């Protein structure tokens, strides 16, 4: 059997497009009436996906083929229903299955637009529901939204389990059993969590209603300002009760986040260290294509585009004579910008790259792009959502949130702002929207003709944004280009004390101070690797589906398990080596690059590397999987590394170490 499977895997690996085509048609046939009931499309997709670990098939092409086939299959069935109506049910072979057709029609009538999404995951019915969506004249726009969303979930739900199955089959049989046991345990936890949430809702809702009733009774018992405000906000007899209640919750939550971020920025707390880690990580992940896309996105949030969109919306509101709404719109955009600038000037926090902007724009917190666009598009959604049909509300909110999120992400990706700047801008913009929305809801909201307002804003965004991108893209790509912030240090100067300028502890992605960095290495990393491999160290196993499943093996080899890629200020390890110890233990050495280059005045400068050595022990909780735990000892593993290299020197970094786990010394190697 193993030889048979390996032969198939080799053939598929040499003909990957045949496999992708089969997956496409298997997903398509799943949605074809009658054929989808009998043709094992799901089994075919899972079987082909299982060959990924042992052949040359790619995971992403398989996912794309499955998604495209699922969308095309449902779309074809929908078209058949729209084209032939109920007449198609009387034709062969559909007339052979009246009971399945009747069940599918009842399912569609019971669930309405959701049936296309739910039917994708319902055996037998999934081949008929798209057909009835066409027969019963479901709007094409609503159908394709449900079609695409369900395909994006359905395809990974078939491909990824197949990949895991293939990886488990390539290991020992016990791994597959342990994987099944672990999945069952996870399903049990999920079921218990669902039950707990339902129980909390069932018991919590009556409690919340009782507290609301008591609050309203107190509010009705007097005529003070506080009582009147509470009555106006939480009276369930008012039409806007639920909206105002949700806005009040958003206001409290967003304000709490903003004040927390502001405190961390002002005091230089943990979040500030996370800023550097996230910045370094994103700068390492940048690509030319990503730069083009993100520069264009950030240009959609420029002040030129914001002003154009604001004026277009203002003109529409004036044409509708919605004067009160105009005042709120002006406040939403202009005061958000004004408050943002005031906070920048008050804190004067520098940007990651100070020379990007001049004047007040050189200050960083909070992000102006994020704050103003969040306020503008957020308040726009609040205005139009009151008049839109339910089918339009979700796409409109999703589109606005996508624009806001992408603009915020572009500021992070391009290095224009710190993480705390963007989070603070989102929180501040959300707080300002909630304040305006609550106030606006108290003053008899005016009709704004939502579709027309959305159309004028969308057209203006496309025209103004496209013009801004075409005029400034080349200039802005140069402005936001990756900057290598490096400095040079003489090798002798580093050895004589310059090593103190490098970090003493690892800083995780969340900004926490982690284990001490007990190693500093100067020189070519390839030579360092060769030197350590000759001293008995081994390359760490790279991460893959097979390597991940090896943690489920009954007695795994400590040297065959991949090491966790811990980050140092957002940088991934440049080199990870392991060394065997007695029993289920190993040493793990990780080296990270720094922004300091060492030079001896002759050869080209080489980066200085900082590292940490950890002793890891393997544990098997519940007997299902293996986990590694690092021993709280930095001195012993560093001494083991020192014994592997010649020419190293120990220097005292901390005179009085805070814990007995580290003697405060660092190993220097060149």
Image: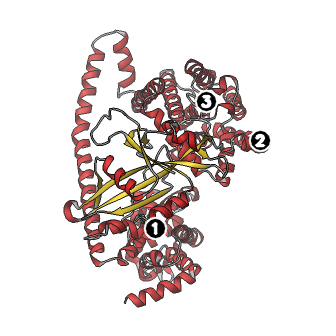
Tell us which disc is closer to us: 1 or 2: 2
In the image: residue 637, left or right of residue 314: left
Marks 2 and 3: in contact by CB < 8 Å?
no
Q: Give the x, y percent position of residue 464.
A: 74, 39
Question: Which residue is labeled 1 in the image?
Answer: 129
Question: Which residue is labeled 3 in the image?
Answer: 368
Above or below, 475 relative to 367: below
In the image: residue 225, left or right of residue 604: left
Q: Callout 3: few (<14), some (14-19), or many (20+) C-alpha neighbours within 10 Å?
A: many
Question: Which residue is labeled 2 in the image?
Answer: 475
Q: Nearer the viewer, residue 530 or 307?
A: 530
Residue that extends furthest to the front in the rendered view of this protein: 647
In the image: residue 73, left or right of residue 104: right
Tell us which disc is closer to us: 3 or 2: 2
The kind of secondary structure element at disc 3 is helix
Q: Callout 2: few (<14), some (14-19), or many (20+) C-alpha neighbours within 10 Å?
A: few
Above or below, 215 relative to 357: above
Q: Residue 512 sits in which quadrant? A: top left
Q: Nearer the viewer, residue 64 or 568?
A: 568
In the image: residue 485, left or right of residue 198: right
Q: Callout 1: few (<14), some (14-19), or many (20+) C-alpha neighbours within 10 Å?
A: many
Q: Give the x, y percent position of residue 168.
A: 35, 74
Q: CA distance from mark 3 to mark 2?
A: 20 Å
Identified at 39% across, 61% down, the residue is: 578
Q: Earlier in the sequence, mark 3 or mark 2?
A: 3
Above or below, 3 relative to 430: below
Identified at 58% across, 31% down, the residue is: 367
Q: CA distance from mark 3 to mark 1?
A: 47 Å
Q: Nearer the viewer, residue 357 or 449?
A: 357
Identified at 46% across, 78% down, the residue is: 54
Q: Earlier in the sequence, mark 1 or mark 2?
A: 1
The kind of secondary structure element at disc 2 is helix
């Amino acid at each position: 059997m193993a030889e048979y499977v390996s032969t198939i895997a080799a053939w598929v690996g040499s003909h990957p497009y045949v496999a992708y085509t089969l997956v496409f048609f298997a997903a398509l046939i799943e949605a074809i009436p009658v054929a989808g009931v009998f043709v094992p499309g799901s089994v075919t997709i899972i079987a082909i996906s299982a060959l990924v670990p042992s052949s040359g098939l790619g995971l992403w092409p398989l996912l794309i083929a499955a998604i495209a086939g699922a969308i095309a299959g449902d779309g074809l069935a929908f078209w058949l229903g729209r084209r032939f109506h109920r007449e198609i049910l009387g034709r062969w072979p559909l007339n052979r299955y009246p009971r399945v057709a009747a069940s599918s029609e009842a399912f569609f009538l019971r669930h309405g637009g959701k049936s296309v999404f739910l039917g994708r995951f319902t055996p037998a019915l999934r081949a008929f529901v798209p057909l009835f969506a066409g027969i019963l004249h479901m709007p094409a726009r609503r159908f394709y939204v449900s079609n695409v969303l369900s395909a994006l979930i359905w395809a990974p739900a078939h491909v990824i389990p197949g990949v895991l199955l293939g990886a488990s089959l390539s290991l020992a049989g016990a791994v597959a059993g342990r994987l099944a046991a672990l999945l069952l345990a996870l399903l049990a936890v999920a079921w218990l969590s669902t039950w707990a949430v339902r129980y909390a809702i069932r018991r919590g809702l009556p409690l919340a209603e009782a507290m609301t009733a008591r609050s309203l009774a107190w509010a009705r018992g007097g005529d003070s300002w506080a009582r009147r405000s509470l009555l106006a906000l939480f009276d369930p007899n008012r039409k806007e009760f639920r909206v105002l209640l949700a806005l009040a919750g958003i206001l409290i939550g967003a304000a709490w986040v903003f004040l927390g971020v502001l405190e961390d920025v002002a005091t230089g707390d943990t979040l500030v260290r996370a800023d550097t880690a996230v910045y370094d990580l994103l700068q390492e992940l940048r690509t030319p294509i990503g730069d083009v896309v993100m520069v264009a996105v950030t240009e959609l949030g420029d002040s030129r585009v914001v002003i154009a969109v604001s004026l277009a919306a203002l003109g529409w509101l004036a044409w509708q004579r919605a004067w009160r709404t105009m005042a709120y719109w002006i406040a939403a955009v202009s005061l958000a910008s004004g408050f943002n600038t005031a906070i920048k000037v008050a804190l004067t926090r520098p940007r990651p790259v100070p020379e990007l902007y001049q004047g007040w724009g050189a200050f960083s917190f909070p992000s102006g792009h994020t704050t103003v666009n969040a306020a503008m598009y957020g308040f726009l959604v609040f205005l139009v959502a009151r008049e839109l049909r339910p089918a339009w509300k979700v796409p409109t909110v999703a589109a606005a949130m996508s624009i806001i999120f992408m603009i915020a992400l572009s500021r992070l990706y391009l290095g224009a702002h710190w993480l705390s700047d963007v989070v603070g801008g989102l929180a501040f913009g959300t707080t300002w929207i909630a304040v305006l929305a609550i106030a606006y809801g108290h003053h008899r909201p005016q009709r704004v003709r939502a579709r027309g307002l959305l159309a004028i804003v969308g057209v203006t965004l496309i025209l103004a944004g496209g013009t801004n991108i075409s005029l400034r893209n080349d200039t802005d790509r140069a402005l936001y280009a990756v900057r290598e912030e490096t400095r040079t240090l003489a090798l002798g100067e580093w050895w004589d004390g310059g090593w103190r300028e490098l970090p003493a502890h690892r800083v995780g992605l969340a900004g926490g101070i982690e284990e001490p960095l007990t190693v500093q290495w100067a020189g070519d990393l390839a030579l360092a690797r060769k030197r350590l491999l000759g001293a008995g160290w081994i390359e760490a196993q790279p991460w893959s589906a097979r390597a991940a499943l090896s943690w489920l093996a009954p007695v795994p080899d400590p040297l065959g398990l991949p090491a966790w890629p811990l980050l140092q200020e957002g940088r991934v390890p440049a080199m990870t080596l392991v060394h065997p110890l007695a029993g289920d233990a190993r040493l793990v050495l990780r080296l990270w690059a720094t922004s300091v280059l060492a030079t001896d005045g002759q050869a080209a400068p080489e980066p200085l590397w900082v590292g940490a050595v950890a002793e890891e022990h393997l544990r098997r909780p519940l007997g299902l999987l293996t986990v590694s735990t690092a021993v709280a000892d930095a001195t012993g593993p560093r001494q083991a590394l020192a014994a592997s290299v010649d020419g190293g020197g120990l220097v005292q970094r901390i005179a009085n170490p805070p814990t007995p786990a580290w003697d405060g010394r660092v190993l220097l190697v060149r």
